[in-house]
């Protein structure tokens, strides 16, 4: 609704101080033209909003202008209480603080809106934890980021010996239940898996943060670059449609590229894995519901593996 969007623009400008048309359009998922029309509407309503020109310009509010219009709608209240990342807050040492914040927020809500918050808590539970990594140094990493201080650490890469590094910490990212430290080292942006950091110490020297650094944009870019470097092994199989629907190739680091029906509930499916071994494990796990077709050497590998298994179980 437009009224909600105008309130959002007002609060964003009040909290951030300045925002460009492009930033507001992206944040609110509308076109830049819509943002311009919204600014005209705010001006017509007497809100002192103005545009500052130049490369570093954007929309601003007069400094003395403030609004207390911070009422939450029922869906907004439900979103806050339903999606409570308990384990992630515990990792950061903020578990109790997060719980206390929700209690205070609940107490501040009108009685008619408290019911919606409790309704969401009792009907939606988000459990993102697949397996738990030990991240005892996470509070140290967080402290360095909050204080904008350089960080000394000992990091153990996947291959190689642990080595000392001094970095400029920029942010923390959690993917699933795995934490990563994003930092700059010798002018290059890098990601460090937090569970592989063996030692860490906050230094007195201020850290250097690039003026144009955006944590979310960096992570999207880094993730895309990582995926582009992943090796690829493609196979073609004949599989029962009902089995493919409940047997997820992604659990073996695979991906269904496309499929076409061939009758009697069967499909010809084209799948992509990182390695032959991953594809082999997925095919064998599906049993008689899947037949490996291509490539030829993969089909032969399946046959040989099944033959060895049969010999193992023969009397």
Image (cartoon, grey):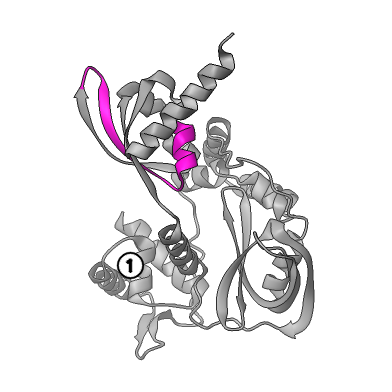
Residue 314 is left or right of residue 154, and the answer is left
Q: Nearer the viewer, residue 157 or 78?
A: 157
Residue 266, percent from left and from top? 26, 23
Q: Quadrant of the C terminus?
A: top right
User: What is the quadrant of residue 140 in the picture?
Assistant: bottom right
Residue 306 spot, x, y in % from top left: 47, 24
Horizontal relation, residue 227 to residue 93: left or right: left
Report if residue 247 is visible in the image. no
Against 214, is 284 above or below?
Answer: above
- x and y, in percent, of residue 111 in the image: 57, 39
- In this figure, which residue is indicated by the disc labeled 1? 25
Q: Residues within 10 Å of mark 1 (few under 14, many from 20)?
A: some
Q: Nearer the viewer, residue 162 or 202?
A: 162
For the point 32% across and 40% down, the residue is 295
Which corner quadrant holds the N terminus?
Answer: bottom left
Please state the horizontal and vertical placement of residue 112, each as a whole percent of the image. Answer: 52, 38
115 and 221: which is toward the camera: 221
Q: Which of the pair 78/135 is nearer the observer? A: 135
Magenta stretch, residue numbers: 263-282
Instruction: State the residue at coordinates (38%, 71%).
Output: 23
Residue 275 among magenta residues: yes
Secondary element at tag 1? helix
* Residue 305 in sight here: yes
Residue lying at 48% horizontally and 65% vertically, measured from the top left: 222
């Amino acid at each position: 609704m437009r009224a909600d969007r105008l309130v959002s623009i007002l609060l964003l400008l009040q909290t951030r101080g300045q925002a460009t048309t492009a930033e507001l359009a992206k944040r609110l998922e509308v076109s830049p033209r819509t943002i311009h029309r919204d600014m005209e509407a705010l001006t017509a309503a007497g809100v002192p909003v103005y545009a500052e020109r130049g490369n570093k310009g954007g929309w601003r509010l007069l400094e003395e202008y403030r609004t207390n219009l911070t009422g939450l709608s029922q869906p907004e209240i439900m979103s806050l209480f339903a999606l409570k990342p308990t384990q992630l807050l515990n990792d950061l040492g903020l578990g109790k603080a997060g719980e206390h914040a929700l209690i205070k927020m609940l107490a501040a809500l009108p009685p008619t809106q408290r019911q919606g918050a409790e309704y969401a808590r009792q009907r939606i539970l988000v459990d993102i934890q697949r397996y738990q990594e030990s991240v005892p140094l996470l509070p140290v990493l967080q402290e360095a980021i909050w204080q904008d201080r350089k960080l000394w650490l000992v990091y153990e890469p996947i291959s190689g010996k642990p080595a000392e590094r001094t970095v400029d910490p920029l942010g923390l990212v959690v993917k699933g239940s795995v934490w990563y430290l994003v930092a700059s080292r010798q002018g290059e942006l890098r990601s460090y898996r937090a569970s592989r950091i063996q030692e860490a110490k906050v230094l007195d020297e201020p850290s250097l943060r690039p003026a144009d650094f955006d944590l979310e944009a960096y992570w999207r870019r880094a993730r895309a670059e990582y995926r582009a470097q992943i090796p690829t092994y493609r196979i073609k199989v004949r599989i029962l449609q009902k089995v493919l629907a409940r047997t997820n190739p992604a659990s073996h680091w695979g991906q269904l590229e496309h499929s076409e029906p061939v009758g009697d509930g069967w499909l010809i499916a084209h799948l992509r894995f990182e390695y032959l071994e991953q594809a082999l494990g997925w095919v064998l796990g599906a049993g008689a519901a899947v037949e490996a077709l291509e490539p030829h050497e993969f089909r032969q590998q399946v046959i040989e593996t099944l033959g060895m298994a049969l010999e193992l179980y023969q009397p």
